[in-house]
Amino acid sequence: MTLTTPIPVDEQPFDIRRRRHLGRWISGTIVLGLLALLAYSAATNPRFEWESIGGYLFAPAILNGVIVTLQLTFISMAIGIALGVILAIMRLSPNPVLSWSSAGFVGFFRGTPLLVQLIFWYNLSALYPVISFGIPGVALNANELITPFLAAILGLSLNQAAYMSEIVRAGIISVDRGQREAATAMGLTGGQTMRKVILPQAMRVIIPPTGNELVGMLKATALVSVIAVADLLYSAQIIYARNFDVIPLLIAVSIWYVVLTTILSIGQEFLERHYSRGTVFATASRSGLVRRMFATGRIARLDEGEQR
Amino acid sequence: MTSLVRAVNVEKRFGALHVLKGVNLEVKKGEVVCLVGPSGSGKSTFLRCVNQLEDIDAGLIWIADEPVGFERRGQSLHELSPADAARRRSRIGMVFQHFNLFKHMTVLENLTLAPRIVLRENEAAYLPRARALLEQVGLAEKANSYPAQLSGGQQQRVAIARALCVQPQLMLFDEPTSALDPELVGDVLAVMRDLAQTGMTMIVVTHEIGFARDVADRVAYFHDGQILEIGAARDVIGAPQHERTKSFLASVR
């Protein structure tokens, strides 16, 4: 007795016809048409002054502004992250004084506009003309100590620390409680557990929003133009205050911001890959973009992209 | 034989909940003691108190004549600093229900973390030991895998090897097979059986009555925060004296 089902001999192989996605073709055409109109208008409107934008892009004052913007971004972000980690650990501490003061810091710096904070630090000398840090014999002139650049760093980094602390805290909380218990049980101290076990795993949760924050920080540095720090935007403003070439300068500045943020985003992707070690995650396949759009090929198989 | 663990009138409360109501237990060196009983009876909490994952509210636990969480100076007991408490814990291996392997580290890195940063050993000392332990639990070829690439049973065997890698004087098992698919339980129990035969002192919280009967020297039946019945494994499991023990054993068989 056989249990296999006999295959019908006359079974013909089928000719499989895919559906045509008419709607995708129509909407795609409309959007492409609109983009073409936009490009045509930008190319033919002489007031864009494309030829002068190229000159402004690499003008020494603008390049200098780029450097100041990058300095502000990275210094403030570094301080913001370091302080944010400390604030997050304080917030999760069993010591109520540490926990509450961290919450207070976050509440204050998140609750006031960054612009207001920047102007406040810029004018700190009005509040404390002499800064002594409480050390006898030390008396620093606040007006000389708090330069516009330092005021900008203070404002940007303290504000950033408040946001970073919430991001880091979310990351720490996201790590399974058992990880901490296992580390504690094998004799790691609290600090070792945090450094070797908790934070490396929290990074997976921390990095994507931190990348957002870094891009946000790069753009937020434009605010320091109000306290006369010669960042990218302020350098452009100085030039167009003289020659009224506002639009080309703003376009040149925007190009720089886009280029810089794009570079940062690429860096973020590499970091994310590094910290996703040991996790099973599906890497979305990018090939076949056209195929997905217009469904021209075979149907994407489910197991695609699940390879590690 | 001398006693390695001696718990005296151990009490533990979580807020209004009185979890341990005076637990007394002595475990001799080289002995395997299984703690059985209904869930919520306090056996897991007791185990966690032994290596101070929980602080106890009353009583004392002695391990190798040192009070857990304290340093004895004459007739007074001084609370340990967190660093000293951590050092004490490193002499005890613990295996958890949910394995708790470090997910961002390979199997080998999981094993060598504590020898490296807690015991501060040289690579020449801990690496051969780690590899030998992986061999012992049958997972030598998985040294460079991440936990997520292993089955539950394999993860738990790695967790046992990791706990052994600090060369502990005592091993604690907190329901090591409860989170496993039934067909994977056997491999983990086999590793524990082998370990018991090497003379390791073990306290095992388990629902595997068969394992308790075959491997344990003694079995303690927990009920409502106390040890209701304790004795040789074949006596407690084969001929329980207490009504509650009888009905519990009947229900898990």
Image (tube, coloured by chain):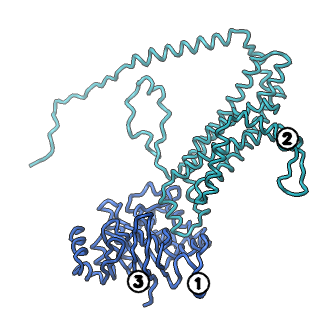
Chain colours: A cyan, B blue
**A185 and A107: which one is in front?**
A107
The residue under label 1 is: B76
Type of amino acid under label 1: Ser
Type of amino acid under label 2: Ser
The residue under label 3 is: B26
Neighbourhood count class around disc 1 (C-alpha, 10 Å): few under 14, some 14–19, many 20 upward: few
**A122 and B57: which one is in front?**
B57
Q: Any mark on residue B153, and which?
A: none
Say whether residue B83 is left or right of residue A141. left
Relative image position of residue A25 (x, y in whole percent): 44, 16
Quadrant of residue B73 in the image?
bottom right
Helix, strand or loop at label 2? It is: helix
Q: Chain of mark 1?
A: B
Relative image position of residue A48 (x, y in whole percent): 72, 13
Tell me what residue is drawn at x 60 percent, y 88 percent: B74
View extreme (left): residue: A1
Up/down of B70 relative to A118, above or below: below
Neighbourhood count class around disc 2 (C-alpha, 10 Å): few under 14, some 14–19, many 20 upward: some
Relative image position of residue B147 (x, y in whole percent): 46, 57
Q: Chain of mark 2?
A: A
